[in-house]
Amino acid sequence: NRQIRLTARPVGEVEPEDWEHVAEPAQEPGEGQFAGRTRFISLDPAMRGWLDDRPSYLPPVGIGEVMRAGSVIEVTASNHPGFHPGDHVVGTFGVQEHVVSDGKGAMKIDTSLAPPSTFLGALGMPGMTAYFGLLDVGALREGETVVVSGAAGAVGTMAGQIAKVKGCRVVGIAGGPEKCALLTDELGFDAAVDYRAGGVKRALREQTPDGIDVYFDNVGGEILDAALTRLAMHARVVICGAISQYNNATPFQGPSNYISLLVRRARMEGFVVFDYAKRYAEAAQEIAGWIGAGRIKVKEHLVKGTVDDFPETLQMLFRGDNIGKLVLELA
Ligand code: NDP
């Protein structure tokens, strides 16, 4: 059973030396347990935060522990009444080839509805994040102007498309012409802003003539600051993430334009998707309906490899090498 374990806490960017590649004999399932083979591993920006020893919504991954990760496994043997060989199961099983589980926090998925990897993306955590972040925290209403940063990523592609389903004007911010073309030509965004080309503030002024009602922020830093200058009255700024800051060796850069919250009587609110766990089924059903009706397109970026490719694949998120949900598919 090959595993990736954390050996050191990175300062700034994660280095190959921060990981240990280990091989152990695969375990047999005990009473009330099942065993499975990992098929798909989710890569998430939040993983960078889990490596730091500071208070957060989850404890940090311990030194010497198998790296925490969401994944889809295929059950190979079972002494558990709820899981049978051949079942596909999603859960937080870690970066390893073989898994033994008592089923806590694990969920059987119906692969006739969608390919297994989609339960890590559009129908999984990123899809839930976009849905609840936009509709609950952002309190989105028809006809509003929505701006999404990190728009070509797992959460961003879903947030922008859900806002379109809800009848909003949607502007996406992403890195590079290829991603921007995807947003407008394939995913139905009304406009896209390439932040790598510079001039984000000016571009937002052009694309949001009536101001921004909901800003769904995945990146933080300068882009958040630019969006704050464009708020409409009673705007909602949804703090979903701040990937531009996760690799900082120094404290996060806060927004200097926050006073526009006062001027525009706006609010800024953060959230953690796990708090909505009781409503995942409801959201997944609605999203699956939109996908089935062709109103939402699923974008996934599958990298084929082994668990040993995990460290390098994780870095793709911070270089912007992924389009849509980044997943490591084990051969
Ligand atoms: P993505 O699929 O969006 O991948 C990350 C993307 O971030 C990259 O493709 C890149 O796109 C962009 N990026 C990387 N570095 C920078 C930078 N310095 N400045 C601007 N953009 C950058 O990841 P996810 O969709 O999985 O996650 C998106 C955000 O949502 C993250 O901040 C994550 O932490 C957050 N999140 C929050 C949750 C919650 O409960 N609050 C739950 C899940 C995710 P580009 O080429 O455009 O730069």
Image (tube, rainbow, N blue to C red):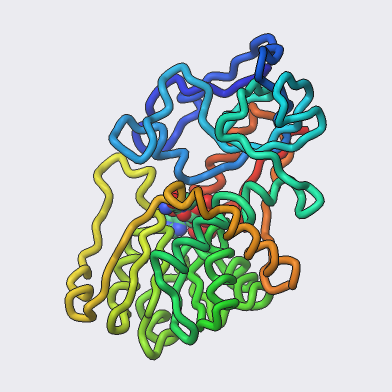
Q: Position of residue 235 (x, y in %)?
A: 32, 77
Of residue 57 and residue 221, the one placed in the foreground of this image is 57
Query: Where is the C terminus found, in terms of image quarters?
Result: top right
Name the residue rendered at 65%, 44% in the picture. Answer: 327
User: Is 204 placed left or right of 267 in the picture?
Assistant: right
Q: In x, y percent, where is residue 65?
A: 48, 20
| Residue in the image at 49% along x and 83% along y | 142
* Any part of residue 320 in sight: no
**Residue depicted at 43% across the width and 39% down the height:** 48
User: Is 116 situated above or below 66?
Assistant: below
The answer, for residue 309, to whether it is visible in the render is yes
Is residue 114 left or right of 49 when viewed as pictured? right
Q: Position of residue 176 (x, y in %)?
A: 55, 66
Q: Of residues 61 and 16, which is closer to you in this image?
A: 61
Residue 198 in the image: above or below residue 241: below
Q: Where 57 sits versus 197, above or below?
A: above
> Farthest bottom residue?
209
Q: Quadrant of the N terminus?
A: top right
Q: Nearer the viewer, residue 78 or 319?
A: 78
Q: Position of residue 238 (x, y in %)?
A: 37, 64
